[in-house]
Amino acid sequence: MSEVRFRDSIFARLVVLAICVSVGVTVLLWAVTLTTLDRGSKAALIRAVDVDLAGLADIQASGGQAELERRIADRLALSVDEGNAAHYMVADDAGHRLAGDITRWPSLSARLSEGGYVTLPDQIPAYARATQLGPNLKLLVAREFGHDSALKTKIGWAFLAAGLFAAVAVGIFGRWRAQRLASRIGRINQAFREPDENAIDALSEGATERDEIGELTRHSTEALLHLRRMVGAHRETTDQVAHELRTPLMHLDNRLVKALRSVPDEENQKLLADARAEIRHVIALLESLLDIATSEARKGDRLGLAPVNLSQLVGRIAELYADSAEESGHTFIRSIMPGIMFQGEEMQLTRLITNLLDNAFKYVPAGGTVRLALEHGPMISVSDDGPGVAEADREAIFDRFRRGKTGMANAPLTGHSAGLGLALARAIAERHRLTLNLAPSTKGASFVVAPEISR
């Protein structure tokens, strides 16, 4: 099993979500600010035009047209180029300009004191209002609003900078917090992956936190300790059962040995020898069942595993079987890659490999070929060119007390002849987070041990 990468973790998604939320909030605030600014600036522009127009109307009413034109000229002379500059036009009823800097009367009714947004000469956007000052005299006051657009642009850039800063700040802070939370969850996952003393002790670092992960850490610690107690009790019980059953059987075997020495009758000696063989078979059966139960109970448990030089281990086993292969008339081919290390129990791995080899040599007739291969992964394969396994039995042969039908008539009685050899081999493989399967082959059988596929 592989650890979850940070980019695939839920905390990384939360950080991305927080960044998106901060960007969304910034954009929303920018839109609200621009809308408020636009409405406020338009209202201020309209008020400025109306106030200016009312003031000039009062000047005309009190000082006449000449005073109005003089005041407009003064205002144009003092008008600055930047900002919402003011523009004026005094015209007769036909629209001919009498004073001011606007050369053409816009489509606004002076008699209705109509106001609106117009485009002045040189494509200048402005807000204007017209009013009728006399029977043949009308006034137009306009103010530019281009400065507001520049202000909006500045505000937009300010919000963009603030949004980027907020997104980066949220990303940095969120990643820091997310990695801290991920490390706390990682300690829990590590304890479940390898529930040894160090991993369980590491959980105590987060058990004091009062949040949800702290509560999960406490519950996980209690569950793992409870599981260890159960496994320990199971192991102790199986050891006691094995001892209580093995001891009387061994005593019975010793008595049969003494009886064989004292009985001269060959027929009775044969019966006693058969009884001894049955006792040894029962002992082997008992030990295999206990080994299977122990391996299944410790499935995935990393406690007790140590680095094993798998290349050397398989090499030693291969040397032993090479000698017996010559005596039985089999061809034994070995292909072992050097330097392959693996975390496991050496004795259990030895039983796994020897069970597969025993199974192969048992069912392959003399003159047949058995192959043993070790590759990086690690991947161990034991294949032969014997009668193979029937399609209906390809998975059933791994069940307890199940044996393939092919080739069984000539198989000798052994400690695993009750159909526990492959069941024990698979239990040992799963205890080491390995899989044992019967691979497809054109001839014979091919058993492959390989690492579990990470989920």
Image: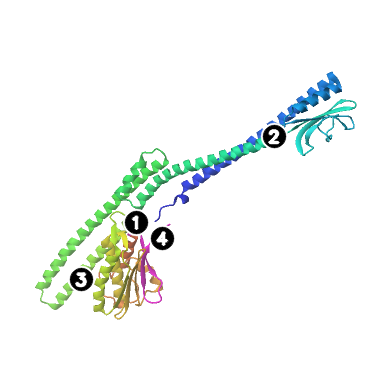
Residue flagged by tag 2: what amino acid is it? His
- Nearest the eye: 379 or 312: 312
Q: Residue 17 in the image: state x and y as whole percent.
A: 52, 45
Q: Are marks 3 and 4 in contact (CB under 8 Å)?
A: no
Q: Which residue is mark 3?
A: 277
Q: Which amino acid is tagged 1?
A: Gly
Q: Disc 1 or 3, which lies upstream in sequence?
A: 3
Q: Residues within 10 Å of mark 2 (few under 14, many from 20)?
A: few
| Magenta stretch contains residue 181 | no
Single out the mark in the foreground, 1 or 3.
Answer: 1
Work out how far the residue at label 1 is from the one at label 3, CA to CA, in angstroms: 36 Å
Camera-near label (2 vs 3) is: 2
Q: Which residues are magenta?
A: 431-455
Image coordinates of residue 63 in percent, x first then y, are: 84, 19
Label 1 neighbourhood size at 10 Å, few (<14), some (14-19), many (20+)? Answer: some
In this rendering, does residue 420 appear at all?
no
Disc 4/disc 1 C-alpha distance (Å): 13 Å
Residue 40 falls in image quadrant: top right
| Residue plotted at (78% across, 34% down) | 116
Regarding mark 1 in the picture, which secondary structure is present there?
Answer: loop
The residue under label 4 is: 453
> Most extreme residue toward the front, as rendered?
77
x and y percentages locating residue 263 in the rendered image: 10, 74
Tell me which numbered mark, 2 or 3, is placed earlier along the sequence.
2
Contact (CB < 8 A) between labels 4 and 1? no
Residue assigned mark 1: 300
Q: Nearer the viewer, residue 290 or 18?
A: 18
Query: Which mark identifies residue 178?
Result: none
Q: Which residue lies under the disc numbered 2?
A: 147
- Vertical placement of 143 versus 355: above or below? above
| Residue at image point 43% right, 45% down | 179
